[in-house]
Amino acid sequence: MRKIGVLFISIILFALSVSSVSAAERTYRVFVHGALSTSNAISQGGSTLVPAKQVLGSLGYAISYDNKTKMTSASKKGTRISFTEGSKTAFVNGTKTALPLAPKKVSGTLYIALKFIVTYSGETMSVDPSTKNIIIGKEAPPAALNIASKPVSTTKVKFRNVKWGMTVAQVKKAETAKLIGSGDGYYYYETKASGMDATLAYRFTNNKLTDAMYIFKVDHINSNAYISDYDSLKSALVGKYGSPDNDQDIVYYGDLYKGDARNTLGTAVAIGQAAFYNMWTTADTEITLALYGDNFDSSLVLQYSGLAYKSEVSNSQNAKAAQGL
C-alpha cells in the first residue's frame, strides 16, 4: 500500500476510474457477455454514454492514455480505437471516424457513446426497457435480466459529526480527529475507520462540504489480503445500507486475469488489470467503496459524496480545468 503523504493525497482523491454519476442521471445497466460492466450508463442527446475504461475493459481491450496528446486508446486483436475528451473525431485503426457525441467527463470519469464502442467492436447489442438492461454479446444470466432497477433509498447518511454544506469552520469545530494538513480545498485528518488506520479527507467547494473520503493505510505483503479488507468493509456497508446499486463488483481492464478466482486477484489489482468497486445511493449521499492499483501499489478507499452538491462540484472542476485556456 502506498504511503500517502499529505502533499500527494489530492492527486488521487476523488479520481477513481470507477467514479459514479448521480442517481438522477442513471439510466441503463450494461452487461457484457453475461457480466455486469456498469450500472452508470447515462443518456444525453439521444445517445447512451458509458464509462469508457469500464466497458472497453469488459470487452477485453487494453487501455492506454497519452499524457502529451490527451488521447485514450483501446487495443484488442488488431483493432485500435482512439478518442479524446471533448472531440467528436475518433480514430479506428488510424482512420478518422465521427462520434455522435464527444467523450465527456462526469465526476472525473471519461464517458463515450456506447453505439460507437459496439459498432467497431463487432458485437451485437439488445436493449430491454422493462429491466433497463443493455446486453452486449451473449445474453446476461436470467437472474440478472430479471433484476429491476434498485429503488432510491430514503435513508440519510450520518457521517461522523458533519453535514453536507457545512463551512470549513463548522467542520473543523465538529471534527474531533487530529488535523494533519490542508490545501486546495481539502482538509486531512488522522483517524481510524472500521478498525483500520486511515487518512480522512474532507473536500470543500465554495466553502461548502461536498465530499469526504477514508484512505485506508493498510500494508500487506500478500496482495490478496487487500481483497479481504475490501470484503469486510463491503459487508459492513451492506449491513448498514442494504445491497449495493451495482450487482457485480469486479472491473477488468483486459483479459489477462479474467476467469481467475475472485480471492486471488490481488496482483491483478496491484498492476491495474482489475479493480473492485461497489456503490450505494441514499436519499442524500452517494457512497463508493473501491480497491484499485497501479505499479504494484494498491489503494483501498471509501468515498461519501453529497448528492445535492454534485453539479456544483462538477462546475467548479470544469472552471478550474478551463483556466488559462
Image (tube, rainbow, N blue to C red):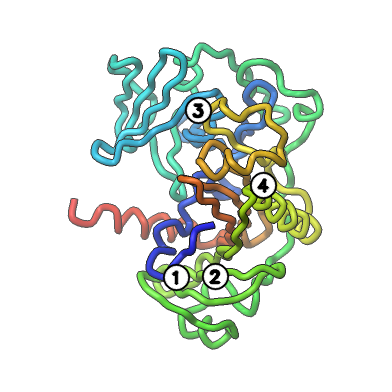
Which numbered mark, 1 or 3, is in the foreground of this view?
A: 3
Q: What amino acid does circle 3 point to? A: Leu
User: Residue 18 sits in which quadrant?
Assistant: top right
Viewer-nearest of discs 1 and 2? 2
Label 4 and label 3: CA atoms lie apart by: 25 Å
Above or below — where is 225 with respect to 306? above
Q: Where is residue 61 shown, x and y percent of the image?
A: 49, 25
Estimate the spatial distance between the alpha carbons at disc 4 and disc 1, rounded to whole Å: 34 Å
The residue pinned by badge 4 equals 224
Q: Earlier in the sequence, mark 1 or mark 2?
A: 2
The residue at which mark 2 appears reads as: 199
Quadrant in which the N terminus is drawn: bottom right
Residue depicted at 47% across the width and 22% down the height: 117
- The answer, for residue 43, to whether it is visible in the render is no
Q: Of the residues shown, which amino acid type is indicated by label 1?
A: Phe
Label 2 vs label 3, nearer the camera: 2
Q: Nearer the viewer, mark 2 or mark 4?
A: 4
Spatial CA span between label 1 and label 2? 16 Å
Pointer 1: what residue? 204
Whole-Å distance between the Cαs marked 2 and 3? 32 Å
| Residue at image coords 49%, 45% | 17
Q: Position of residue 169 (x, y in %)?
A: 47, 85
Q: Position of residue 201 (x, y in %)?
A: 51, 69
